[in-house]
Each structure stands twice: as C-alpha cells, then as structure tokens.
Image (spheres, rainbow, N blue to C red):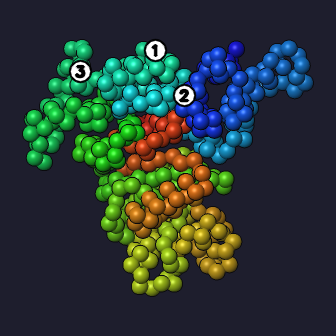
Amino acid sequence: MRWLIWLKKPVPDIVNLAYGDIDLKFGKDYIIPKPVDPRLITAVAPAVARAAIETGVARHPITNWEEYEFQLSSRLGNDNALSKIIETKAKQDLKRIVFVDADNPSLLKAAQVIVEERIAHPILLGNRKRIEAAIAEYSISLPDIPIIDPQEPTSEVDRNRLERYQKNLFEKRKRKGMTHREAEDLLQTNSYYGVMMVEEGDADAMIGGLTKKYPHTIRPALQIVGARPGVKKVASMHILITRQGPLFLADTTINHFLTSEDIADITELVHREVTGLNIEPRIALITYSNFGSVPKGESAVLMREATALLHKRHPEWMVDGEMQAHLALNPELRQKFYPFSRLANHQANVLIFPSLSSANIAYNLLGVTSNLPVIGPILLGLRKPVHILQMGASVRQIVDMVGIAALHAQQAERS
C-alpha cells in the first residue's frame, strides 16, 4: 500500500526527539506511526481516504489528490507550505547536488528523501567505506547513487577528474600565492573538492558544513566560485517560519563591517531571493531608532542612509526604515505614530540588520526561545550555488536547503 511505502522512509526528527530514540526506523518495533509523527496526517489519512473511495464508502470522492494532500500538510504549519513551494520548483528541473561529508546519517537520510521525492539527484562525497557503513547501519536506501572519495579515487574517471581539479585550482589561485602542492593537499578535503565539482560543472550545487565549522566551507566557496558579476558582497539569510508566515533575516553569517551602500546591496540580494519564492518582500531596515528619532547614532544613521539609497534605486519597492523591530512587525502601531511609512498597513516579512552580530543573535534567539523552524543559512550572491548547513541541522532542514540549492542552480542556468 502507498502509505506503507511512506512509512518505510526515515522517521521524522520530531518523533526521535519526542521519544528519546535517535534511530527509530520502520520495522517490527515501529510499524504504526506514533502520535507525534506527521505522517499520520500526510500519509495515512490520504490512504484511508483512497480506500474509502475505492470501496464506495466515501460520499464525496476526491478528484485533486495533490491539492488534498497539500491541504493536509498545511495543517501541520506554515513551514510545510513553504517547503512545498521550494520542492515543487526544484522538481521542475532536477539538479545534481553534491553532499559533502556524506557519511553523516542525517545527510544520508535526507538524500533518501531527496531521491524518493524526486527533488534532486544527490552525489555522495567523502570516505567511501564510512558512507557505505552508515548506509548499512541505518538501513538507508540509496541504490545507484554515485559515491566519490577524493582520497581514494577508484576509477580512471575519478583519477582524471582529480588531476584536472588540481591543475585548475592551481591556475585559479596561483596569483594568490597557492602552490601546486597546496592545491593537491586542499583537494584531499571534501569541501574544496565539492566546490570544484560545482565550478567545473560536474555538479550543479553543493551542500556542506553539517559537521564542520562555518569558515571551513565558506572559504573554498569564496575562493573558487566567488560572487556573481555586479555583486560586491556575498551575504546570507535565514528564514524563520512563524504563524504569520516566513520571516526573512539578513545578513546573518558573513559580513562584519557594513556601509550604507553595503546594506542596500544586501537588501537587493534578499529582495531577489524572496521574490524567487513567490513571496512579495515587505522590507524593514531595523535598529534602535525610528525615522530619525536618534539623529546621531551610528547604527541609526547607517540604516537611514541605506533606506534613502533604496528609495532612490527602487521607488516602487515596499521598503522603509530606519525603525525598531517591534514597529516593523506591528503595522497598527506603526500606522498610529508613523502613517507616512511606505510599509503602510503591512507587516514586514524581511528584516535587514545593521550588523552581523545583531542579525546572528536575533535568528538564534528567536529560533530557540520560540521553537520556530529555521531554514538557512542561505548564501546570496555567489556565482554558482554552494550552501552551508547549520551544524546539527535536521533532515527536514537539509531537504529544504537542497531545494534552495536546486532553485539557485536553475536560476544560474537561466542567467
């Protein structure tokens, strides 16, 4: 039965967390989903409905099953709706996504979901023996998925590819002080090898960083892929899934010292990303001041000047500042005191911060204390898609990031 196939997929993280078991999986000890398992809604309920229709019990047959299942999924929260948008767009043109350090069980479980849902074509990168051992230990089904081990190339194709990467990495970085030997050593690491796969066209996007510190993966991305033409600063964004819908925060992980022009440029990157998700950006540049109430504060002046630049560049955009965060999220209060705001009676869904510190603290604080689902960090402005997972990301978060990477690969191909 179709619902039984669904239940053989990796058990959602929320179930393992609720029952204190880090490796629940389908079998003699886990056949019927536990109460917190969302598949009771998304898999079992549709199966019951189909059986009722087939046996003639149902009085109102369902004709649009995709819409019916989407409605069921949406009852679990807004994150499922946004995930559905991401996955639907990714499915329109499947891309090859290389998974760095793929011996991690969460990555492998996510790869299985990616294959079964036809979201992308995964490529597993890392120590072949450890990857195969993890696949066997956790009963993960990944038949015919390519595994590449940079340290032990097993075929002539793999050896030729490694030699090509070493040569091209040296050529790319020789005027930055890199030697042949350093290029060879760097390509023994999965992060550099994975980024070179994207740069050389052997993969369309890369996902990494699940078990490594952030600089370990961002450094090769900036050195090898670099920014798109016209982009002065690569930035990053997190998405918090709230009851009112997704809330986009930037720049959360990369840039330390920003000018007003930098902030305007980053806002443009975020606007493009949010628009690409079929969501209208309503942007607030936030700080501790409201529309000049603190005339000389460094952060206030910074955001005030950035707002002026954006108004000049994009007079049609719904963007305003500088303002405090509570006013950005409370349109009634903002209308009462500042009725001239270009956000009018709309709640902001994009928050641009004056510094890396404030943005990073905000998304971590909100995500943990409010238990909000988080997607990110999403890198913006790279010439080709490379994304870095937050350490300890869940299977759901990895799948969402793969979907984002696939969308970016589609956009890069069109441009």
State whether residue 217 is above or below residue 153. Answer: below
Give the vertical position of 101 relative to 29 (above or below): below
- Are the two marked residues, 1 and 2, in contact with CB atoms closer than 8 angstroms? no
Q: Please, which residue is most extreme toward the front here?
A: 20
Residue kind at label 1, given as amino acid type: Pro
For label 2, the residue is: 23
The residue located at (65%, 68%) in the rendering is 330
Query: What residue is at 50 percent from the left and 69 percent from the top?
Result: 286
**Closer to the camera in the image, 320 or 117:** 117
Q: Secondary structure at mark 2?
A: loop
Residue occupying image coordinates x 38% and y 39%: 211
Residue 83, quarter of picture: top right
Give me the C-alpha separation between circle 3 and circle 2.
30 Å
Eye-nearest disc, 3 or 2: 2
- Identified by mark 2, the residue type is Asp
User: In this view of the protein, which residue sits in the foreground, 265 or 75?
Assistant: 75
The circle on residue 143 is: 1
Name the quadrant of the C terminus.
top left
Whether residue 313 is visible to the viewer of this picture, yes or no, is: no
> Dot 3: what SS?
loop
- Real-space CA distance between mark 1 and mark 2, rounded to the nearest whole angstrom: 21 Å
Q: Position of residue 121 (x, y in %)?
A: 44, 25
- Give residue 10's quadrant in the image: top right
Q: Residues within 10 Å of mark 1 (few under 14, many from 20)?
A: few
Q: Which residue is mark 3?
A: 152
Q: Mark 3: which amino acid? A: Glu
Under circle 1, the secondary element is loop
Question: Residue at (84%, 24%) from the top-left corner?
Answer: 61
